Amino acid sequence: MTTIGVIGAGAIGSAFANALANKGINVILSNSRGPASLAELVSGLGPWVKAGTREEAAAQEIVLVAVNWSRLPVALAGLPDFAGRIVIDANNPIEAPLFKPVDLQGHTSSAVFSELVPGARVVKAFNHLQPHLISADPASEGGRRVLFLSGDDQQAMETVGGLISRLGFFGIDLGALDVGARLAQFPGGPLPALNLVKFT
């Protein structure tokens, strides 16, 4: 599999990078402070993860974005058009430390996010589980931990679904962004933070 870019090295971005590294998938991890600030984190994640600029991360065929909601516009500003590449929206419209929900005026967070990544095929995923469950063994409870995904491009959904399966999770397709993203959105949706396991 191609190298995957990650914009945002907080709890979710780091957990996702760790999950990829556990399966031998190359990662370029970036944040707002530059590659040097990630040296210790990247060292702990192993040889599959390398620190890079946000431009380097954004240039990959698959890019996951996990940034504090209020910082998303700055984190994504000035990047080239994504030109059909896949961007995974792992963001939630809340503001730490009080976890106050953002007023989206009736829109889904993914609809707002999509406007910040022109040209991208957006798939909503990896936002509804707590970070330690993303980085942990998906089979640790005797089945395969469930991950929800939604999107409007079928090929992008199949690609991200394949990645989810490769990581050991059981992906459940929630359909189009305007429906699925609302179900998995935190806060507000009924699915976030549920630790569901699919038994075979």
Image: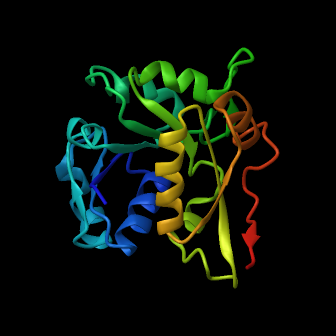
**Farthest-out residue, left:** 36
Residue plotted at (22% across, 35% down): 55
Image x and y of residue 141, in percent:
69, 82
In the rendered image, the vertical position of residue 185 relative to residue 2, given as above or below: above
Q: Nearer the viewer, residue 200 or 19?
A: 200
In the rendered image, the vertical position of residue 111 relative to residue 58, given as above or below: above
Residue plotted at (69% across, 27% down): 178
State how the image is colored: rainbow
**Farthest-out residue, front:** 155
Locate the N terminus by quadrant. bottom left
Residue plotted at (54% across, 54% down): 161
Q: Nearer the viewer, residue 169 or 17?
A: 169
Disc tally is 0
Q: Would residue 67 be found to the left or right of residue 41 on screen? A: right
Q: Quadrant of residue 134?
A: bottom right
Locate the C terminus by quadrant. bottom right
Q: Quadrant of residue 176?
A: top right
Image x and y of residue 19, in percent:
44, 67
**Farthest-out residue, top:** 105
Image x and y of residue 69, in percent:
53, 32
Q: Nearer the viewer, residue 95 or 7?
A: 7
In the rendered image, the vertical position of residue 194 relative to residue 174, given as above or below: below
Image x and y of residue 20, in percent:
39, 65
Residue 157 in sight in this render:
yes
In the rendered image, the vertical position of residue 193 relative to residue 109, given as above or below: below
Residue 7 in sight in this render:
no
